[in-house]
Image: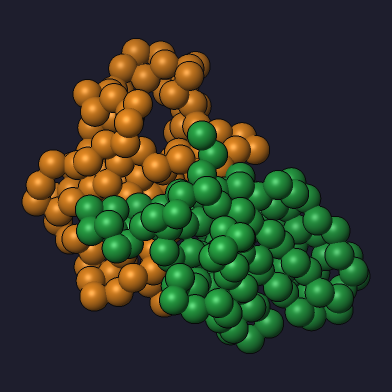
Chain colours: A orange, B green
Amino acid sequence: GAVVSQHPSRVICKSGTSVKIECRSLDFQATTMFWYRQFPKQSLMLMATSNEGSKATYEQGVEKDKFLINHASLTLSTLTVTSAHPEDSSFYICSAIPLGQYEQYFGPGTRLTVT
Amino acid sequence: DQQVKQNSPSLSVQEGRISILNCDYTNSMFDYFLWYKKYPAEGPTFLISISSIKDKNEDGRFTVFLNKSAKHLSLHIVPSQPGDSAVYFCAASAESGGTSYGKLTFGQGTILTVHP
């Protein structure tokens, strides 16, 4: 099956610093990846669509300058949370769609805690 | 505005019985629906999907039913097993919208507990 990995799985950072989260498709190529965040006991909320070789598309209310997305290759997308604040603490999950397929495959998620 | 709703936060079922998880949506543009299973601190795992041109899709113990007129879908798991205990999310997408390809809107999730 299609496997998506995320790194790191858990990160704690101080307020004001930046954190980079990687999302990799391990055994397939994906022109499109998605970034979601999930607050405790809430639904997954789509943050942005990451397109290989082009700018990401952000959902309404998501600050593109705060959540920088880079999709440099067909197997890697990165999300950088810049100048993180405690309210950015959340569970960040990426997903990818294999070329020519339809279903999304999700990564295991990254727990970000900003102190 | 919650476009996809799972009104039951939790469901408890005895092993061997049927589990029925429900989901309602409001956006009539949604034409593709999916169910995901999720364990704590893990990403969702795809279970089953259905296109709006169908009203039923079956895969092993899992069956999804779609009632477009009622904007309602349900996931049936039979027989239920203790290993099915997890959070189940329904998700919807408006694929025919072109630019919306792949963008999923999730429900709040239902915690399923299957007792031995």
How many marks can you see? 0
Horizontally, residue B83 falls left or right of residue A110, namely right
The one of A97 and A27 positioned closer to us in this rendering = A97
Task: Write down the quadrant of residue B17 in the picture.
Answer: bottom right
Task: Identify which residue is drawn at 31% across, 36% down.
Answer: A59
- Asked which quadrant contains residue B94, the reply is bottom left
Q: Is residue A103 visible?
A: yes
Q: Is residue B49 above or below residue B37?
A: below
Give B21 or A62, whichever is nearer the viewer. Answer: B21
**Which residue shows up at 54% across the image and 65% down it?**
B68
Q: Above or below — where is A55 with respect to B80?
A: above
User: Along the horizontal axis of the image, is A83 left or right of A40?
Assistant: left
Most distant residue in the left direction: A53
Q: Position of residue A107 (x, y in %)?
A: 42, 55
Question: Splitting the image into 4 quarters, where does residue B73 fall?
Answer: bottom right
User: Which residue, as the protein is rendered here, is positioned at the far front?
Assistant: B69
Vertical comparison of B52 with A88: above or below: below
Instruction: Estimate the x, y position of residue B33 in percent, counting from the top left.
Output: 48, 64
* Residue under the point 45% across and 54% down: B28
Is residue A27 among what the camera can see?
A: no
Viewport quadrant of the N terminus of chain A: bottom left
Q: In the rendering, at what x and y percent does residue B35 appear?
A: 56, 64
Q: Residue furthest top?
A: A16
Query: Considering only vertical position in the picture, is A70 above or below A68?
Result: below
| Image position, residue B71 (x, y; %) | 57, 58
Which residue is found at the position 38% from the left and 50% from the top? Answer: A94
